[in-house]
Amino acid sequence: MKKLSLIGLGLWNEKDITQRALEEIEKADVVYLENYTSKLPGTTKQKLEQETDKKIQLANRKFIEGGKILLNAKSNHVALLVPGDPLIATTHTDIILRAKKQNIKTEIIHNSSIYNAVTETGLQIYKFGKTATVTFWKPNYEPKSFYQTIKQNKERGLHTLLLLDLEKTKDKYLSPQEAIRTLLEIEKQEQQEVFTEETKVIIGSKLGSPKREIKYGKAKEMGKETEIDPPASLIIPGELHPLEEEYLQQFKVNKGDQNN
Amino acid sequence: MKKLSLIGLGLWNEKDITQRALEEIEKADVVYLENYTSKLPGTTKQKLEQETDKKIQLANRKFIEGGKILLNAKSNHVALLVPGDPLIATTHTDIILRAKKQNIKTEIIHNSSIYNAVTETGLQIYKFGKTATVTFWKPNYEPKSFYQTIKQNKERGLHTLLLLDLEKTKDKYLSPQEAIRTLLEIEKQEQQEVFTEETKVIIGSKLGSPKREIKYGKAKEMGKETEIDPPASLIIPGELHPLEEEYLQQFKVNKGDQNN
């Protein structure tokens, strides 16, 4: 059967697969694992194969965006496994659209993404503004749009979720400390009082997993934090509701500071 | 064991449960299903009992917020099943906080929520601004804050997700058509050109399920649409990327209108 099923794997390991996903994978002729928009930190291809009882092939950007996967789905039921939720990355929406144009049936099976896991900080999801991604700075490439996003969200009292870039060639995520240093550098240049050493930030590491770690404190305190495991996110709180404020207290890095 | 596990059930039926959730439910001494912040549309308590192989008791607001569930978790491992993601509703964040204060161990097992399913419209999740809820209007209770949310998001080119209120006493959701009529009524009063008959809107019904229905058109066209099954959401697009625009074409209610 001609069919392309995009299947979310959730946030941590092979145990985050839903019953619906397992049943769909069972029906598929061929199963691919997308391994370039993000990574499933707590598992391996082998463990996924055991859990699903299927042989799984890795699919890179060229295979997916170059159209080979659609060619395959013209004569087979193809399942594409995607860490997190399958439609968070724009590239997957594009694949669905191209499949429909070629009369290939599609199926979308959701799973948790960072937009679920970020609630573990106690911040209310409906009070988040636009999301931004903090990218690696390189010579002659120093984007600042995420600084403006924080500014605009703050003006409305909204929280900002900052995703941290994945450097594909080096297979390395931007660390939250590097993101903080970049934001402080932009503040020096822009002087708009958007992100100073006194700005409160939340670092969330491995959110949505049993190994989650959350740290809350001023930017100047966070820079000193030791290693934080990827995947991590940075959250800049807007105006805090008393319940949000109370929830965050358990994550404070500097328990002695009453003004924190 | 003293433990409270908050377990998300996802968006549609008993097949959306994750492996991790099933393993946690199996370990629990007692299992409750929360049935007042939202509802799992495609299943029943009986089917959930079959899938989990556990007896499940319904838990109402009084039982959860009144503290009986925490009393129970002081001597048992209590699993609380929640439609969607367990931390979307503020009340569950509050329960986690209160459990921690009473030294009750907690566990959070995520699942998909409307923030995952809304991507089925083709709109990019990171371009959504603040979320708002459209409430039922009653005599002397005519809130307009969601109109201002749309306005502020639009000013920045952002999409707005509008959740539709659940009237608890009548067990009835606000319909998307009623929400559109309310927004047009506010427009008449406010005259801010935020939501007119020409405004493009998306109605998403049963998003995240195999029975999803999506409709895209002008506000004046949507009012005429016949019955739309709950749960439904209303989405007001901001500035559309060409890929978003192209994706939306498949959902147009008025295919003949080239300006749509």
Image (cartoon, coloured by chain):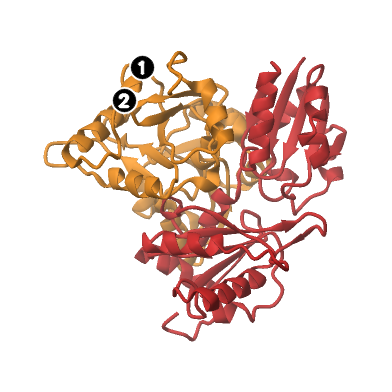
Chain colours: A red, B orange
For marks 2 and 1, give the CA distance. Answer: 8 Å
Q: Is residue A147 left or right of residue A208?
A: left
Please identify the quadrant where the C terminus of chain B is shown: top left
Q: What residue is pinned by disc 1?
A: B225
Instruction: Name which residue lies at 83% across and 23% down.
Output: A72
Which three-letter amino acid code belongs to the residue tagged 2? Gln
The reply to whether residue B55 is in sight is: no
The residue that appears at 68% across and 44% down in the rendered structure is A16
Question: Within 10 Å of the Cα at label 2, are there few (<14), some (14-19), or many (20+) other Cα atoms?
Answer: many
Give the farthest residue toward the front: A140
| Residue designated by label 2 | B177
Image disc number at residue B39: none
Which residue: 58% across, 55% down?
A: B107
From the viewer's side, name the closer residue of B32 and A214.
A214
Establish if A100 lies above or below B126: above
| In the image, residue A174 above or below residue B191 | below
Q: Position of residue B207 (x, y in %)?
A: 51, 30
The residue under label 1 is which amino acid type? Glu
Q: Earlier in the sequence, mark 2 or mark 1?
A: 2
